[in-house]
Each structure stands twice: as C-alpha cells, then as structure tokens.
Image (cartoon, grey):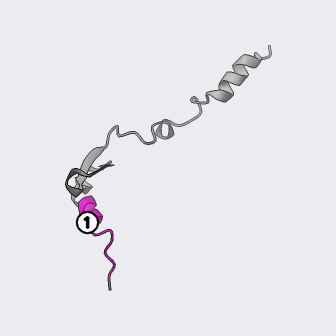
Amino acid sequence: MKSDKFDVRRKLNHPQGVIPKEKQQAGTTKDKFPVVLDDGKTIIFISDKNKEQETIERYKNRGYKKP
C-alpha cells in the first residue's frame, strides 16, 4: 500500500525523527554552568564547571597581544 501524500509531506516538513538530539538542543543552556563576566554585564555558559577560572582569565586577556 502506498503511503498517503499527506503523510509524506508531514514527514518532510517535520523531520525531527532523523535529527540527532544534540542538534535539536543547540543553543539550550541545559546541563551548562553560567559564568558571570564584566561585573554581571556578560554571562556565558560552559559545559565544564572545572574550566570556570580558565574561562574568566581568557575573557580578561582576550584583547591582549604578546609583543
């Protein structure tokens, strides 16, 4: 039995079944930790809590170029 045209169109318009969950959740802050920078003006989210200090230092030195 052939599939209905409507069912085929619906699968093309909503392909969530074939998209990996990692891509569906792109941009989400689930399972991430906030790091507050610039006295609260900037907040970024990192996945590894152990790298919080490193992230803060990298942000402070982002415009610094070695001579």
Residue at 68% x, 29% y is 12
Secondary element at tag 1: helix
Position of residue 35 in the picture relative to residue 15 (left or right): left
Q: Amino acid at mark 1?
A: Lys
Q: Quadrant of residue 9?
A: top right
Front-most of 28 and 47? 28
Q: Quadrant of the N terminus?
A: top right
Q: Which residue is mark 1?
A: 60
> Which residue extends farthest bottom?
67
Instruction: Say if 55 sits above or below 47 in the image.
Output: below
Classify residue 60 as left or right of residue 26. left
Name which quarter of the figure residue 31 lies in. Answer: top left
Q: Residue furthest front?
A: 41
| Image quadrant in which you'd find residue 58 | bottom left
- Taking the magenta stretch, the answer to whether it contains residue 57 is yes
11 vs 57: above or below = above
Residue drawn 29% across the image and 63% down it: 59
Quadrant where the C terminus sits is: bottom left
- Identify which residue is drawn at 24% across, 55% down: 37
Residue 6 screen position, x and y as percent: 72, 17
Q: Which residues are magenta?
A: 54-67
The total of numbered circles placed on residues is: 1
